[in-house]
């Protein structure tokens, strides 16, 4: 009975707040002469703050046109904006900036949804050793990470040198499918110096020519000790869940002036690999058995950062400077 009353109160409170909010919107429109979309576009700076408010306003609208506008095809965005302007009785000649601002926001909103679909497609595609393209990508990964060391054979213990668990990496891609390989190759190719340094650090001291005592005596970089490729696949899982949950909207809406793409996602993965590597050193774990603890702490830190509407995780990739005050 108590549970039923609690549920009833929550439902009543929900509808009361919804009714109150609609009344407030009606009053604001009468006072300002502008609809909610206009107020958001004119009073909020471009980026995540504006786009997320526009997305919420469209999604929560009682109008079917506005509700479905967040999931239209990119080619239909311009026509959708015209329909919205007509529905809201807004003259585009008197309010030209509104159409421009809405277009920028819808490109980001629709682009984010499409990016989820693209990433999900890669994640669901298993690694196939009979597929020449998959095999070519895997061999390129080795060449990018170990340019001066030839791979003796496709099935080889050498794969452990870049952090795979056995002599055939295909078994390690089961959780994230091709997405894990795509991200690792992107990191190794586009940020080769950093990727090779992270790999080198991750191998010490277990694969170092120095003993642990010599390592400490020479005061070289701190010994790290984790499996590079496996951690990369794990960080891919982290990036994927941040994307699916919507946590990355803040980041992508701030760095992508239009639709976020797979490249933006891969750049974010590179950033997360950099940051996790530094975080692992700062945490100074006793051994790899502490990985889950360190990863969870790192995840919480990233999520906290993404709660800031002005946050851009990787400013060196940011396109936010190209945003104009639309």
Image: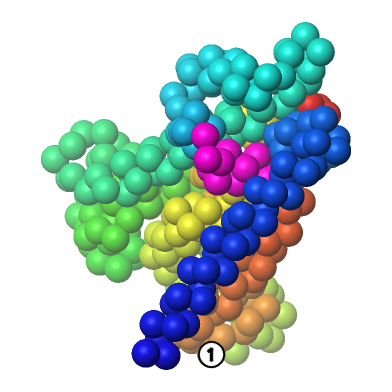
Placement of 30 over or under 212, stated as above or below:
above
| Quadrant assignment for the C terminus | top right
Could you say where residue 228 lies in the image, as x and y percent from the top left? 45, 64
Residue ID at (22%, 48%): 126
Range of residues picked out in magenta:
53-63
Q: Along the line of sight, which residue is nearer the eye, 60 or 103?
A: 60
Could you say which quadrant of the image residue 185 lies in?
Answer: top left
Q: Give the residue number, with chain letter if any, for mark 1.
A: 286
Q: Is residue 76 magenta?
A: no
Could you say which quadrant of the image residue 198 lies in?
Answer: bottom right
Q: Is residue 57 magenta?
A: yes
Q: Is 136 situated left or right of 55 in this image?
A: left
Is residue 253 in sight in this rendering? no
Q: Along the line of sight, which residue is nearer the eye, 295 or 42?
A: 42
Residue ID at (57%, 69%): 13
Could you say which quadrant of the image residue 169 lies in?
Answer: bottom left
Placement of 175 over or under 315, stated as above or below:
below
Placement of 288 over or under 242, stated as above or below:
below
Residue ID at (47%, 33%): 64
Q: Is 314 situated left or right of 264 in this image?
A: right
Colour scheme of the rendered structure: rainbow
| Quadrant assignment for the N terminus | bottom left
Label 1: how many Cα within 10 Å (few below 14, some 14–19, many 20+): few
Q: Along the line of sight, which residue is nearer the eye, 107 or 102?
A: 102
- Work out which residue is located at the far top of the displayed protein and give it: 93
Could you say where residue 316 lies in the image, as x and y percent from the top left? 73, 44
Is residue 183 in sight in this rendering? yes
Which element is circle 1 on?
A: loop
For the stretch drawn in magenta, what is the main secondary structure? Answer: helix
Could you say where residue 147 lies in the image, as x and y percent from the top left? 46, 45
Residue ID at (44%, 77%): 7
């Amino acid at each position: 009975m108590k549970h039923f009353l609690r549920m009833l109160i929550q439902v009543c409170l929900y509808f009361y707040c919804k009714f109150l909010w609609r009344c407030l919107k009606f009053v604001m429109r009468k006072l300002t002469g502008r609809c909610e979309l206009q107020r958001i576009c004119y009073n909020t700076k471009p980026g995540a703050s504006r786009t997320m408010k526009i997305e919420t306003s469209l999604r929560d609208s009682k109008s079917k046109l506005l509700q479905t506008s967040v999931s239209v095809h990119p080619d239909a965005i311009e026509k959708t904006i015209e329909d919205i302007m007509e529905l809201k009785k807004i003259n585009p000649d008197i309010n030209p900036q509104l159409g421009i601002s809405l277009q920028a926001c819808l490109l980001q909103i629709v682009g984010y949804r499409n990016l989820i679909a693209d990433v999900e497609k890669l994640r669901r595609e298993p690694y196939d050793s009979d597929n020449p393209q998959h095999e070519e990508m895997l061999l390129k990964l080795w060449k990018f990470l170990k340019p001066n060391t030839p791979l003796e054979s496709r099935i080889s213990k050498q794969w452990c040198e870049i952090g795979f668990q056995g002599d055939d990496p295909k078994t390690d891609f089961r959780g994230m499918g091709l997405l894990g390989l795509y991200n690792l190759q992107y990191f190794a190719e586009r940020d080769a110096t950093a990727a090779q340094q992270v790999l080198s650090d991750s191998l010490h001291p277990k694969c170092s020519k120095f003993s642990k005592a010599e390592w400490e005596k020479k005061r070289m970089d701190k010994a790290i000790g984790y499996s590079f490729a496996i951690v990369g696949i794990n960080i891919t899982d982290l990036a994927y869940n941040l994307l699916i949950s919507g946590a990355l909207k803040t980041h992508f809406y701030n760095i992508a002036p239009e639709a976020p793409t797979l490249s933006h996602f891969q750049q974010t993965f590179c950033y997360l690999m950099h940051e996790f590597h530094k975080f692992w050193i700062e945490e100074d774990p006793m051994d790899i058995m502490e990985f889950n603890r360190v990863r969870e702490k790192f995840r919480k830190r990233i999520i906290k950062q993404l709660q800031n509407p002005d946050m851009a995780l990787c400013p060196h990739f940011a396109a936010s400077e190209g945003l104009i005050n639309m």
